[in-house]
Image: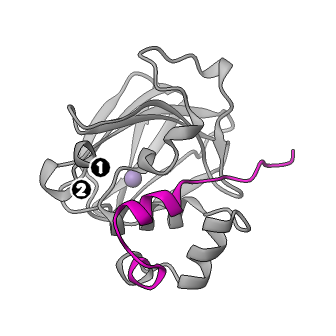
C-alpha cells in the first residue's frame, strides 16, 4: 500500500495568524526547517506533529485538513479515503470543527496490535470516545482501561493519553474533541 502524501494547510493557517516561520516554530515546538518542508509539501507531518501544530496555534485539528473533506451534514466513510499516517493510525473526519459547537469528530481505526499515544492537547480540551467496533484500551492518568463496542467515555485530554488494540480484530471508535472557546483563535474573525 502506498500512502498518499498528507497535505495540510499549514502555510495558509500560519499566514492567516500573521506569523513568520520562526514565530511558528517557537509557538509549536516544530523546527523551522520541518515547517518549511511541510509547507512546500516535501514532507508529510506525523500525527504527533500535526497535534503540535494544532496546540501551538490554538486551533482544532481540522483547521489544517478541512479542504480534504466535504463539509456536509452526513458522513459515509466508504465514500471517502481515510487520512493515513505512516506507522500510525488512520482516520476519517466525520464532522470538521464547527465554531458554533466548539467540536470536531473523527472515526479512528486501530489495526490489531496497534498502540497510539498522544501528548497533551491544549488546556481544557476534552475528548469523547465511543467504541463502534471491537475492544480497545484507553490510557488516562497513567492507566489503561478496557472498553468494548458500545462503551463511551469522556476525559480531560490536556494530559498524556492513548488508545491501543491488543486484539486480533480491527477496532473503530468515534473520537470527538471539545475545545473550550477561550483557547481558540476565533475562526469566525478570520
Ligand atoms: Mn487526543
Please report the residue visible at 33 percent of the width from the left and 55 percent of the height from the top: 59
Q: Evaluate whether residue 180 shows in this view.
A: yes
Front one among 179 and 13: 13
Front one among 65 and 189: 189
Residue 182 in which image quadrant: bottom left
**For mark 2, what is the residue?**
185
Q: Evaluate whether residue 120 shows in this view.
A: no
As helix, strand or loop, the secondary structure at mark 1 comes to loop
As helix, strand or loop, the secondary structure at mark 2 comes to loop
Instruction: Please tell me whether residue 25 is drawn above or below residue 69 in the rendered image.
Output: below
Residue 67 falls left or right of residue 4: left
Picture disc at residue 190: 1
Going from the N terminus, do you reach mark 1 or mark 2 first? 2
Alpha-carbon span between mark 1 and mark 2? 9 Å
Q: Please say if the residues under marks 1 and 2 sit with CB atoms less than 8 Å apart.
A: yes
Instruction: Please tell me whether residue 12 is drawn above or below residue 110 in the rendered image.
Output: below
Q: Nearer the viewer, mark 1 or mark 2?
A: 1
Please report the residue visible at 41 percent of the width from the left and 76 percent of the height from the top: 24
Instruction: Please tell me whether residue 38 is drawn above or below residue 7 in the rendered image.
Output: below
Residue 69, horizontal then vertical, whole percent = 56, 32
Residue 11 falls left or right of residue 85: left
Q: Residues within 10 Å of mark 2 (few under 14, many from 20)?
A: some
Instruction: Please tell me whether residue 20 is drawn above or below residue 188 in the rendered image.
Output: below
Q: Which residues are magenta?
A: 1-24
Amino acid at each position: 500500500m502506498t500512502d498518499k502524501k498528507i497535505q495540510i494547510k499549514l502555510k495558509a493557517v500560519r499566514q492567516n495568524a500573521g506569523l513568520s516561520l520562526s514565530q511558528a516554530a517557537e509557538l509549536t515546538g516544530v523546527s523551522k526547517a520541518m515547517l518549511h518542508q511541510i509547507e512546500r509539501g516535501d514532507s508529510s507531518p506525523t500525527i504527533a506533529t500535526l497535534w503540535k501544530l494544532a496546540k501551538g496555534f490554538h486551533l482544532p485539528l481540522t483547521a489544517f485538513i478541512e479542504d480534504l473533506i466535504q463539509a456536509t451534514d452526513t458522513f459515509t466513510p466508504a465514500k471517502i479515503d481515510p487520512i493515513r499516517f505512516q506507522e500510525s493510525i488512520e482516520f476519517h473526519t466525520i464532522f470538521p470543527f464547527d465554531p458554533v459547537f466548539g467540536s470536531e469528530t473523527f472515526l479512528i481505526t486501530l489495526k490489531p496490535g496497534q498502540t497510539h499515544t498522544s501528548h497533551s492537547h491544549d488546556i481544557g480540551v476534552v475528548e469523547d470516545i465511543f467504541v463502534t467496533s471491537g475492544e480497545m484500551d484507553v490510557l488516562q492518568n497513567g492507566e489503561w482501561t478496557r472498553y468494548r463496542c458500545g462503551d463511551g467515555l469522556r476525559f480531560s485530554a490536556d494530559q498524556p493519553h492513548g488508545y491501543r488494540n491488543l486484539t486480533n480484530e480491527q477496532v473503530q471508535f468515534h473520537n470527538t474533541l471539545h475545545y473550550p472557546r477561550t483557547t481558540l483563535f476565533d475562526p469566525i474573525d478570520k
